[in-house]
Image (tube, coloured by chain):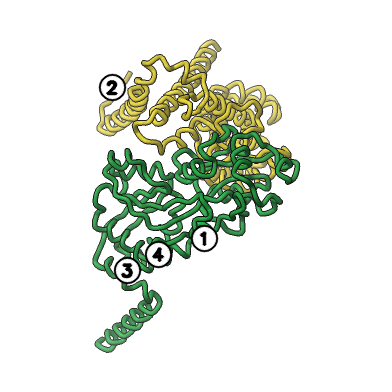
Chain colours: A green, B yellow
Amino acid sequence: MKKGIHVLSLMGAAAFFLLLSITGAAASDLAPFAGQEGALRIAGGTAHIPVMKEAAKQIIQSNPKIQISIAGGGSGLGIKQVGEGLIDIGNAGRKPTDEEISKYDLKLFQWAIDGVGTVVHPENSVKALSSAQLQDIYTGKISNWKELGGTDRQINLYTRDEASGTRKVFWGKALNKGDISAKANVVISNGAMKTAVAGDPFAIGYISVGHIDQSVAAIALDGVTPNLETVRSGDYKVSRGLYSLSKGEPSELAGLFLDFIFSPTGQQIVAEKGFIPVR
Amino acid sequence: MNRPHSLTEYIFLTAAVCSGLLTAAVFIFLLIFSLPLLENGQLTDLLLSSWAPDKGMYGIYPMLMASLTLACLSLSISFPISLGCSFVITALAPARLRRLLLSMVRLMTGIPTVVYSFAALFLLVPLMRNILGQGSGMCILTAAPVLALLIAPTMIIFFVNSFANVPRSATLAVDALGGSEIQKLLYVMIPQAWPGIINGVLLGFGRAMGDTMVSLMLAGNSVSPFNSLTQSARSLTAHIALVMAFDFDSMEFKSIFVCGLFLYIVTALLMLLLRMTTLYFSGKR
């Protein structure tokens, strides 16, 4: 019996050291979560989701007593729900307006810089557009790829729902607040936009630069291709901060979560997911 | 009318009354929240104009038309198929195959709509894009067959059940006269079971009208009034889902209560109308 316990504790210690060596540096950043328990509700911006998910995964692995739920819905929803006290952290891919901040007493945490890039299907021969061309495409004035040197097919416009921060930023900075045609298809997240454009050879859409991968091709706008370097240097103008918001001071667990996002481990996740860390 | 006398009956009565009241409460809730918009005499504006929040227009006309078109189209695809399926299950197939088919249909009722939509997004949408040769492949014509598939099991089960309720004396009489299965179906079962068929259609229409996921994922959600079935369009339910995220105080958010109200009224009116016709005709017979 005694020997059994001995073996067990030895195995436990071995497992413990194994865990330590795997988590490595993350362990110290995750240390504040020890002894914590409870649920954390996060919703809003869909560009944030990959980072939120990875952070939540690491936190839950270090302490299974913490429950974290992550939902999309768009920046508008994130701001509204955190303001109404329905969730603990609301995410927004745009800076909340002064009115929203004062009305809901929001506290802003900007943890990354991101761009919004125009994307097309990888097989599309059009690889560059001017701002004027992009605006004409979105108002519907240019409606065929032929007019841009592509194949003779109708341009399939994709846009985001009106709660989207990505849409607000793209509309303000890339379309110069020009109209978006009512004929445009509407998708409800950055992920859905990527899926839609990746599957449609005649599509044009826009997504968070962090979400751009081989399945879609980024369009150079006025000669600048949207990627990490051009967004960081400021050459690519259609950029924005990624924010997490709390109503007043964040709750203890929400505060720890946000601290983790700003910790070296958290900021490394931000970089791995394709965004520009702020620290 | 028997008065309820056991505890069980009281419990069931309470449950029935509660669910009835709940339906009424939802209606009152929607009415109260849309009243400010309706009082200002904006009703016709809301009903007949299109959606352009930037220009101060919050009309739901394109969505209302898209919802109705989508529901009617999917019903007209689904109804003949469902009726045919129920014939096969009731009379035409060998007995063992009938049981197999019926259990498959039962299984189909449990599949979440998002699964259908997701599969169709990767299979049907590219196909439609190629067939149509223009547009994104997301249109009413893509969403309708998926919606038809979605409502078919409900209808089939309803039809099969109403055929099963045809009195045995009647079907036995056909057998005794040497009638074939098809004769039995056409001349005895359908005339007997048609109120059940109508009810199945009603239920199917209600589901088609109320489903959100299929149209949200497959119809394209464009807000422009559509003039062809191959155009991207937005249903009322998808519209509510897309506008939900707006600020509570915004006009956009308030207008979706009117959407909800209309969804409610259209469905309720239709049910009432068809119920009444069923009652009228079955009373006359």
- Distance (Cα) linking label 4 and label 1: 15 Å
Viewer-nearest residue: B5 or B242? B242
- Distance (Cα) linking label 3 and label 4: 13 Å
Amino acid at dot 3: Leu
Amino acid at dot 1: Leu
Instruction: Specify the subunit that label 4 lies on.
Output: A
- Distance (Cα) linking label 3 and label 2: 65 Å
Tell me if residue A153 comes above or below residue A2 in the rendering.
Answer: above
Q: Which residue is mark 3?
A: A30
**In contact (CB < 8 Å): disc 1 and disc 2:** no
Mark 3 vs 1, N-terminal side: 3
Q: Which residue is mark 4?
A: A267
- Distance (Cα) linking label 3 and label 1: 27 Å
- Distance (Cα) linking label 1 and label 2: 75 Å
- Distance (Cα) linking label 2 and label 4: 70 Å
The residue at the far top in this view is B284
Is label 1 in a helix, a strand or a loop?
Answer: helix
Quarter of the image where one finds residue B105? top right
Instruction: Specify the subunit that label 3 lies on.
Output: A
How far across and down, in percent of the image, does residue A262 sit? 35, 62
Viewer-nearest residue: B88 or A35? A35
Q: Which residue is mark 1?
A: A228
**Viewer-nearest of labels 3 and 2?**
3
Tell me if residue B176 comes above or below residue B217 in the rendering.
Answer: above
Residue A3 can be seen in this image: yes
* Same chain letter for marks 2 and 4: no
**In contact (CB < 8 Å): disc 3 and disc 2:** no
Is label 4 in a helix, a strand or a loop?
Answer: helix
Amino acid at dot 2: Arg
**Viewer-nearest of labels 3 and 1?**
1
Q: Which residue is mark 2?
A: B3
Amino acid at dot 4: Gln
